[in-house]
Amino acid sequence: MVKKVLHSMFSVLMAFLVLFSTVSFTIEKHFCGDVLVDVSLFAEAEKCASEAEEIIAKMDCCKDTIDVVQGQDELTVKAFDDLDFEQQVFVTTFAYSYLTLFEDLSQQVIPHKDYSPPNLVHDIQIRDQVFLI
């Protein structure tokens, strides 16, 4: 039970890791002087307030900075031919041994499949007074 839960948690964690490593986004910041006015991730950052526009017109001290966080453009997918010989042997052996672990039960021969048990005339355990304790 614990193993199954841990396996599920790690698989979800790995899926989120791949998702967040490939997503890119921008962070836009608006400064008035040395004061940070607004920070925005997905939309354009708000500019200075309308009351301060007169001051800004006199002092051109506002600036916008944009930080771009680039995600991964390509995920590397290796083919079987890209592996070394030892790695190819390991992968082949592992796959073969893993696939042969599971045998199909429907093809096994059951010798007593058509055998019907004999009719019980007497209950042998009661007749011989043999009981499991």
Image (spheres, rainbow, N blue to C red):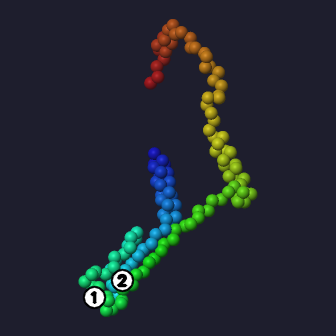
Q: Is residue 41 left or right of residue 102?
A: left
Q: Secondary structure at mark 1?
A: helix
Q: Earlier in the sequence, mark 1 or mark 2?
A: 2
Q: Nearer the viewer, mark 1 or mark 2?
A: 1
Q: Is residue 50 left or right of residue 97?
A: left
Query: In this picture, is 64 found above or below 101?
Result: below
Crowdedness of circle 2 by 10 Å Cα count: few (<14), some, many (20+)?
A: some
Q: Amino acid at mark 1?
A: Glu
Residue 78: percent from the left, percent from the top? Answer: 65, 59
Residue 34 visible in the displayed image: no
Residue 83: percent from the left, percent from the top? Answer: 70, 59
- Dividing the picture into quadrants, the one containing residue 133 is top left
Residue at position x 29%, y 85% from top? 53
Determine which residue is flagged by label 1: 54
Residue 64: percent from the left, percent from the top? Answer: 40, 81
Q: Amino acid at mark 2?
A: Phe
Q: Closer to the camera, 50 or 88?
A: 50
